[in-house]
């Protein structure tokens, strides 16, 4: 998955958990953080992505700094979104998902949302850009620095469709279904872990 796709997974996680809008910025940065190794020397991908077969929940929770961050709503949201990133990478590793020629990035501009089909994933990228720009880091994923995640955030904002400015975009198939499956698997792994379940609270999956 690319970073824009990881943000779709974060949005689905946020919606399903029904968390406060105040933690949304932390979730956006959590979805970006595991790929911020590109923004600093001496860190490679293997330091921020677990080996195959290793538990993504434990991997993230062992690397969150400071530890007290996990006791805040923003820190929990950041951590859950980091887990979502790693689970999505694991689920899509080695599998090609063929996006349609009319939307090769997985996103298609739309003029307006027609009806209220809950299966449609519509993202306002103008709003998403503003949320990303305003988001504040609640904690770190060790061994990253604050500047590394910040650099990755600004690099992402230069990519399509973020560079389009205002506009609604439909998340097309098969990306929309794949993102929902990645979010569902993330939640399943979190609630199967005592430490992960503490982060997501007392919600019930339906």
Image (spheres, grey):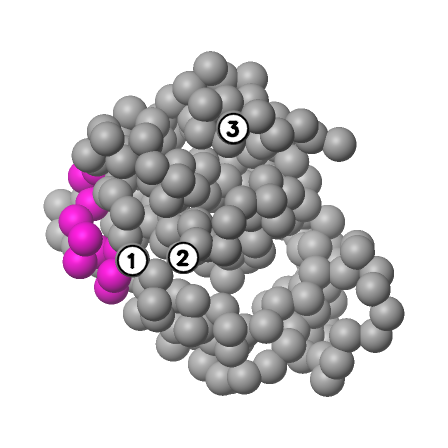
The structure residue drawn at horizontal position 45% and vertical position 81%, both measured from the top left corner, is 163
Image quadrant assignment for residue 66: top left
Prevailing secondary structure of the magenta residues: helix
Report the Cα–Cα distance between label 1 and label 3: 22 Å
Residue 145 is situated, as x and y percent measured from the top left of the image, at 16, 49
Q: Can residue 46 be found in the magenta stretch?
A: no
Classed neighbour count for the residue bearing mark 2: other residues with Cα under 10 Å, few (<14), some (14–19), many (≥20): many
Residue at image point 56% right, 33% down: 186
Q: Nearer the viewer, residue 36 or 53?
A: 36
Q: Which residue is mark 1?
A: 136
The reply to whether dot 1 and dot 2 touch (C-beta < 8 Å) is yes
Determine whether label 2 and label 3 are within 8 Å by CB: no
Q: Which residues are magenta?
A: 142-151
Relative to 20, residue 98 above or below = below
Q: Is residue 6 visible?
A: no
Q: Residue furthest left?
A: 42
Residue 180 percent location from the top left of the image: 67, 45
Mark 2 or 3 closer to N-term?
Answer: 2
In the picture of the structure, the residue carrying the numbered disc 3 is 201
Residue depicted at x 34% and y 67%: 134
**First in sequence: mark 1 vs mark 3:** 1
94 on left or right of 112:
left
Taking 187 as reference, is 140 above or below it? below
Q: Earlier in the sequence, mark 1 or mark 2?
A: 2
Q: Residue 25 got which mark?
A: 2
């Amino acid at each position: 998955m690319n970073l824009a796709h990881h943000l779709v997974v974060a949005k689905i996680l946020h919606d399903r958990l029904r968390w406060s809008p105040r933690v949304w910025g932390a979730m956006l940065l959590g979805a970006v953080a595991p790929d911020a190794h590109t923004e600093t020397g001496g860190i490679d991908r293997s330091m921020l992505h677990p080996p195959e077969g290793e538990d993504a929940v434990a991997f993230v929770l062992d690397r969150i700094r400071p530890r007290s961050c996990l006791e805040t709503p923003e820190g929990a949201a950041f951590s859950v979104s980091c887990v979502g990133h790693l689970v999505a990478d694991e689920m899509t590793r080695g599998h090609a998902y063929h996006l349609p020629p009319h939307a090769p990035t997985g996103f298609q501009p739309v003029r307006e949302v027609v009806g209220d089909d809950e299966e449609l994933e519509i993202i306002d990228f103008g709003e998403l850009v503003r949320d990303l720009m305003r988001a504040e880091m609640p904690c770190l994923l060790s061994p990253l620095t604050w500047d590394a995640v910040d650099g990755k955030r600004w690099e992402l904002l230069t990519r399509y469709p973020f560079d389009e400015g205002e506009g609604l975009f439909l998340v097309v198939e098969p990306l929309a279904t794949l993102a929902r499956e990645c979010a569902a698997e993330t939640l399943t792994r979190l609630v199967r872990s005592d430490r992960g379940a503490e982060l997501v609270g007392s919600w019930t999956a339906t």
